Image (cartoon, helix red, strand yellow):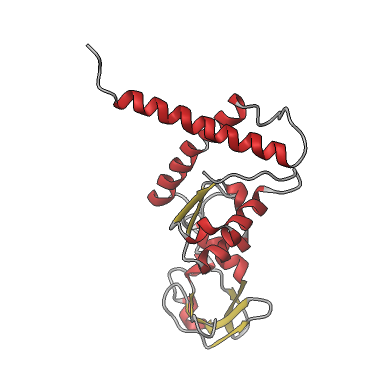
Amino acid sequence: MHADLKENTHSDAQFGEDFVKEHPLADEIDTLAVDGAYYRQETVKHADGKDLEINFSKMTGGPVSDDYIGVDQFEIDPETGEITRCPQGYEPTFAIYDAEKEIYTAKFYKDHCEQCPLLNQCQVKEQKKAYHVSFSETKRRTDQTRAKIGTKRHQDLSNFQASVEGVPSVLKWAYRLEDLPVRGRVRPKIWLYASIIAQNFKRCTKHLKKMAPATI
């Protein structure tokens, strides 16, 4: 179990980013299931760079509705960063990627968009001579994350995360982690790690008792 202790000014989102970016465990695991409070764009970005699947149980705003096509459905060239196709498969007449601002921009033929069955759900906007779309990398990653909400994979990982969260709750209640009887920087950490060791020992003992053969 990984644990750390920081001042109250250290947010959950910062904890999450620090773990994915700097902790050695983040390079060893394949999947990370966390609460929505840990969501941050930089965290998702670092996770993608490490090929780490990260699941957020909840996000503000809820799942993507059926009448909305996220901008993550636009195909992006991994080398140039330019939009190559819309969700329906049409190629743009013009595309550019601003690497400094991380902004994707493209224009599509009016005839293609006006005949498209997905027009009312799409993020394109009508202009005089074409349909235009522009979005940031932040928006693309957010839509990509929201699109996973409600899927079976998301539900399974969220249920797993919820069951694991019971462990910190027990630690807070049984070992006074929310009202530590010690002060300073070092002693609270010693108390925290000792509590985890004690809880692991209790769970191990309980498991061994279940595994032991019944006495006659």
Picture quarter with the C terminus: top left
Rendered view: 155 above or below 148: above
User: Is residue 88 something one can see in this rendering?
Assistant: yes
Q: On screen, 209 above or below 78?
A: above
> 91 or 143: nearer the eye?
143
Residue positioned most to the bottom: 93
Q: Residue furthest top?
A: 216
Q: Nearer the viewer, residue 191 or 11?
A: 191
Residue 65 appears at what percent x and percent y?
Answer: 50, 54
Residue 141, image x, y percentages: 56, 65
Which x, y percent locates residue 39? 60, 54
The percent coordinates of residue 18 (x first, y second) are 63, 57
Image side of residue 216 versus residue 57, left or right: left
The answer to whether one can see residue 60 in this image is: no
**Residue 107 image-quadrant placement:** bottom right
169 lies above or below 39: above
Q: Residue at x 49, y 76 (%)?
A: 114
Picture residue at 77% right of the left edge, 34% below the top: 183
Q: How many marks?
A: 0
Question: Looking at the image, which residue is at 44% across and 76% down?
Answer: 115
Q: Quadrant of residue 192?
A: top right
